[in-house]
Image (tube, rainbow, N blue to C red):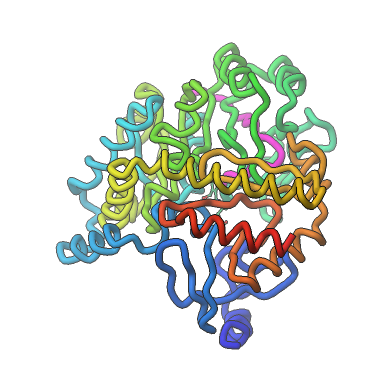
Amino acid sequence: MLSKKLFKRAKTLIPGGVNSPVRAFKNVDGDPFFVRRAKGARIEDVDGNHYIDYVGTWGPAILGHAPNSVTGAIPEMAKDGVSFGIPHPGEVEMAQTIIDWVPAVEKVRLVSSGTEATMSCIRLARGYTKRDKIVKFEGCYHGHVDSLLVAAGSGALTFGEPDSAGVPASLAAETITLPYNDPAALEECFATYGDQIAALIVESYPANAGLILPKDGFLQQMRDITTQHGSLLIFDEVMTGFRLGKGGVAELEGISPDLTAMGKVIGGGLPVGAFGGRDEIMEHLAPNGPVYQAGTLSGNPLAVIAGLTQLREIDHNNGFMKLEALGARLEEGVRKILHEKGLGYTFHRKGSMFCLFFTEKPVFNLDDVETSNKEHFRRYFWNCLNKGLYMAPSPYETGFISMAHTFDDIDKTLEIMNESI
Ligand code: KE4
């Protein structure tokens, strides 16, 4: 097994053998496969096994892997250069597209990852409001930003404790981590600390503890309470942006955040993140304002042309409608399987994002997710993989359908899920 050999060697060279922890398959107690190639809805590993893919490189592959339009545009651009560190027309085009698509974004800056996008939002919010406290929610992940790798303190309202070694307790103490979908805790937090809070950051639909959906009114409460206290509302749409509609969840839910973090889909698989928002806030960024933020590869021409090409293709092919139809077909089939097996497991879906929780409890927050049967999930994951279905290797991740998936793929998927649950 070449994957096994490669992983053994990788572990002598790279921490955990991977360049990002979730790829190590630790949540499913096994070794990862190594990919040889990926095209459309399918992946081939180095041992010649083929899989229908529902990870989609964690979100960017909304057209499917290696779409011809994107793989054609990159080398074409590369003939003129691969990196400039000088403004080029593509950056203007990308900024215009993001601003046209996302109503709350009046100015935008490109970066090279979702983490950079959220980290920049946090620093900008602190610089703009001249306040230090940040509010986030349990179960929400915003990239490996020191101020956001913070678990809930001992009590709901006590200041955060580092969620990773290396994060200074003094910094974590500036972050308050609240239970999600708990309006009373949110109310109490702002009543107590409101005038010290620079921003509240939230995944517009939390998708890093499985896909958790906001209870009616919860997002509006965030908007109202941050406005009331002069704090900024930051929507982290790195996962949901450009996947659930042109304007992301903000448009779907009719909420206008002050800042938005973006990434994944806008890079077409290459490294791109972005953050944007109200003009008067964004104008606080260097070189115009006092908040410093920079990046050698920000606006990289290859990443920009890949992202622009992907966005155009989604738009020209009515992508969001197709993704909704595929998602609805999957949901109908999963609910039928659960019913026939007498399994009351909770299934959430929004458009092309879905998550099957291995718990019969309704899921509104991280505590509910933790009631999942992890052993059953593990068996299910490996049964699926061995039958040619690559689902996310963790009960805390969300599945993604791409525009390359067909209804036949969905039907085949349901057959395998039925044999694997
Ligand atoms: P990156 O720095 O990984 O590009 O983006 C960080 C990030 C920010 N915000 C949200 C809502 C995110 O989901 C992410 C990253 N998502 C994970 C998957 N759940 C990336 C996969 C990984 O860490 O390898």
Compared across the picture, whether 93 is left or right of 326 comes to left
Compared across the picture, whether 375 is left or right of 173 comes to right
- Residue that appears at 30% across and 49% down: 299
Q: Can residue 110 be seen here?
A: yes
Place residue 11 in its image quadrant: bottom right
Q: Residue furthest left?
A: 80
Place residue 30 in its image quadrant: bottom right
- Residue that appears at 58% across and 82% down: 3
Q: Is residue 164 magenta?
A: no
Q: Which residues are magenta?
A: 128-142
Q: Residue furthest top?
A: 228
- Residue that appears at 80% across and 30% down: 156
Compared across the picture, whether 51 is left or right of 287 comes to right
Compared across the picture, whether 204 is left or right of 245 comes to right
> Considering depth in this image, is 248 or 52 the residue closer to the camera?
52
> Considering depth in this image, is 417 or 186 the residue closer to the camera?
417
- Residue that appears at 33% across and 60% down: 67
Establish if 198 lies above or below 96: above
- Count of number-bearing discs: 0
> Considering depth in this image, is 326 or 12 the residue closer to the camera?
326
Residue 42 locus on image (x, y percent): 47, 66
Rendered-image quadrant of the C terminus = bottom right
Rendered-image quadrant of the N terminus = bottom right
Establish if 94 lies above or below 386: above
Residue 269 locus on image (x, y percent): 40, 58
Place residue 211 in its image quadrant: top right
Residue 363 locus on image (x, y percent): 75, 38
Residue 278 locus on image (x, y percent): 39, 24
Q: Is residue 133 magenta?
A: yes
